[in-house]
Image (cartoon, rainbow, N blue to C red):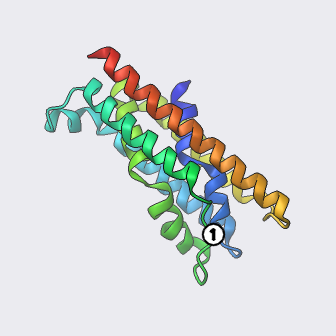
Amino acid sequence: MRQIVFLLAAFNPARLAAALPASGRRTAAAVAAAFGLGAVIVAAALSEPLLDAIDVSASTFRIAAGVVVAMGGLVRVADAPPRPEPGIGGWRAGIVPLAFPLLLAPDLVLLAISLGADEGVAPVAVGGAIGAAAVVAAAWVPRPLGPRARFAGAGAARMLAAVLVVAGVALAVDGVQDL
């Protein structure tokens, strides 16, 4: 269950919704969600071979990933949600700036590796699918028209970022307890 909450917070559909272009919102969201889900599944599937290759235990990696995830969450709590890139629309906006650099940040990838090493690929894939579905669903919500709606969207993005901070701390504490 925690992988669903953690990955939903890392996908942060409210933050990505703020950066969706005016034209081709749904297509851009679907492309970004596909990239995010693919990256989560690949990272989870390669987690054990990767940790073996770099000769790091899962608990040690969990501590490091927790620090990175918490820092990524802190940056997103303090930062304003991104704006759409002018001149980029449709599926291209799903790649840049939505998938790269907004969604596929180090915290999402390290979170997927850590959860994959601890819980296996299937639970992480389910959490990633829910996060990707939330990104696609966010594209169906009409663009905020007034300042109150934009404020609510920014608040939701910051709340999910705060959950990401909690996820990072929880990972780090779990890693320390397992040492």
Q: In the picture, residue 22 is in which quadrant? A: bottom right
In this orientation, does residue 95 appear?
yes
Residue 59: give x, y in percent of width and height.
29, 24
Q: Provide the residue designation for mark 1.
A: 83
At 65% from the left and 42% from the top, the residue drawn is 159
At 22% from the left and 34% from the top, the residue drawn is 51
> Up-down: is 145 above or below 68?
below
- Quadrant of the frame with the N terminus: top right
In this orientation, does residue 44 appear?
no
Q: Nearer the viewer, residue 77 or 89?
A: 77
At 41% from the left and 50% from the top, the residue drawn is 39
Residue 84: give x, y in percent of width and height.
63, 72
At 59% from the left and 48% from the top, the residue drawn is 12
**Could you tell whether 148 is left or right of 20 in the image?**
right
- Quadrant of the frame with the C terminus: top left
Q: Report helix, strand or loop for mark 1.
A: loop
> Up-down: is 42 above or below 87?
above
Q: Which residue type carries mark 1? A: Arg
Furthest toward the bottom, the residue is 87
**Could you tell whether 86 is left or right of 164 in the image?**
right
Q: In the picture, residue 175 is in which quadrant? A: top left
Residue 158: give x, y in percent of width and height.
63, 47
